[in-house]
Amino acid sequence: MALATALAVGLAGCGGPIAAWRSLSGLDKNDPDPAVAPFTANIDKAETGGYPNLASVPPPPIMTSTAADRQKLAENLAAQGVSAQAPDARGVPGTPTSGPVPPPPPIPPALAASHLVTAPPPPAPEQKPTQLPTRRMDEPPVPGSLASTQQPPAIQGLPGVEAPRPPAQEGRMSAIPQPAPSNLPPAAVQSGNPQPAPPLAVLPPAQPSPEAAARPAPKLPPVATTVAALDMPVGTAALGPDTRVPIAQVIAQYQQKPQTVRIVSYAAPAVGSAEQLNSFRAALDRAQIVAKQLTDGGIPAAKIQTEAAPSSAAKPAGRIEVQTLP
C-alpha cells in the first residue's frame, strides 16, 4: 500500500494527477512517443514563446488624396500614355522606350566557328531508376525530420495608397430619330385622321298600340286644395282667437259640399333622430287640436285625416294647413 502511494505521488509530481491516472489505468499506452513524434520542437517552441503584441500592428493606410496628388497622377498617366504610343527605335509603335537602344554585342569567334561547323552533341548518359531500399512488410518507414521547416510569410511592406480612378462618363440619352416623310396620297392621309363622331339618332315619338289607345285614361290621384292656413306657435297647446274664422269657413264649406278634410301640420327641424321624432309628434298633436275643433263643428271624424310634414322656408314650423280632397 505504501509503495502504491509513493508511486502515485511520484507520478503526480511529474505530470499531474490526470497523467498519473492515465498511466496507472493503462490509457497512455497508445500515446505518441515525444522522442519520435513529429513537430514536437515546434509545439514546445510555441508553448514557451510569447504572444504577439497587437499594439505593434501599424494603422491602416488613409485612402485619401489631395487635389495636387490627383493632378500629378493625371500628368504621369498622360506621359505614360504618350510614351506607350510612341514608336521605338525599330519603328514599331506602342512599345515604350526609356532611352537609346544599345547596339548588339559582338559574337565571339568560338561561337561563330561552332555555328559554321556544328559538332554532334555527346550522347546523354542513361539514367537508371533510383533503387529505393527495400524493407519488410512489418517494418515501419524511415522517420523523417521531427521539426517542420515551414516559416510564416513575411510582409515586405505596407500596402500603398490606391491610385484614384477616373469618374465614369455621364450617361446621355440619344436623340429621338425623326420619322421619315410619308409619300402617301392626301386622301389616304386624310382617312387616317380622327373622324368626327356621327350625329345622334333621333327616334320618332312612341305610338301607343290600338289596344292601349282604346283603354280609358288612368285615374290620377286626387289633388288637394288648401282652404285655410293657421299659425300655431311651437310649444302651444291651444288655438288662438284668430283661428275661429278660418275654422268656421271650413265647416261651412263642408256642409255645402262634403269632402275629405286633411290637416297637415309642419314640424320644427331637429338635430338628432330622437329630437326629430319628438318634433313630429308635437306637430301631430297640433293637428289633432284642429281636428277636434272641426269635429265639434259637425264634420265626422271619419272624414278627417291628420299628418305631419317637415317645415321649409315657404311653410315654417307651426303652420297648419287645412286641405280638401275630392
Image: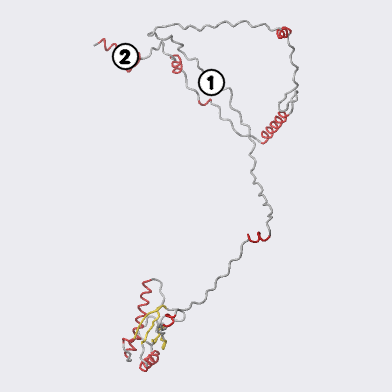
Classed neighbour count for the residue bearing mark 1: other residues with Cα under 10 Å, few (<14), some (14–19), many (≥20):
few
Q: What count of labels does the image hold?
A: 2
Along the horizontal axis of the image, is 166 left or right of 147? right
Quarter location, residue 297: bottom left
User: Which part of the image, by quadrant, shows the C terminus?
Assistant: bottom left
Q: Residue 102, position in %: x, y?
A: 75, 18
Instruction: Tell me, for residue 302, which label it has, or none.
Output: none
Q: Is residue 198 above or below residue 132?
A: below
Nearer to us in this view, 192 or 301: 192
User: Which part of the image, by quadrant, shows the N terminus?
Assistant: top left
Mark 2 and mark 1: Cα distance apart in space: 41 Å
Q: Please give the residue where the numbered disc 2 appears in the rendered image.
A: 23
Along the horizontal axis of the image, is 202 left or right of 30? right
Q: Residue 195, position in %: x, y?
A: 61, 64
Residue depicted at 52% across the width and 74% down the height:
203
Quarter location, residue 299: bottom left
Hey, what amino acid is under mark 2? Ser
Quarter location, residue 253: bottom left
Nearer to us in this view, 39 or 304: 304
Q: Is residue 66 above or below residue 237?
A: above
Please, what secondary structure does the residue beneath circle 2 have?
helix
Residue depicted at 68% across the width and 52% down the height:
180
Residue furthest to the left in view is 1
Residue depicted at 45% across the width and 14% down the height:
41
Please, what secondary structure does the residue beneath circle 1 have?
loop
Along the horizontal axis of the image, is 126 left or right of 267? right
Residue depicted at 65% across the width and 35% down the height:
66
Q: Residue 243, position in %: x, y?
A: 39, 89
Q: Please give the residue where the numbered disc 1 appears in the rendered image.
A: 153
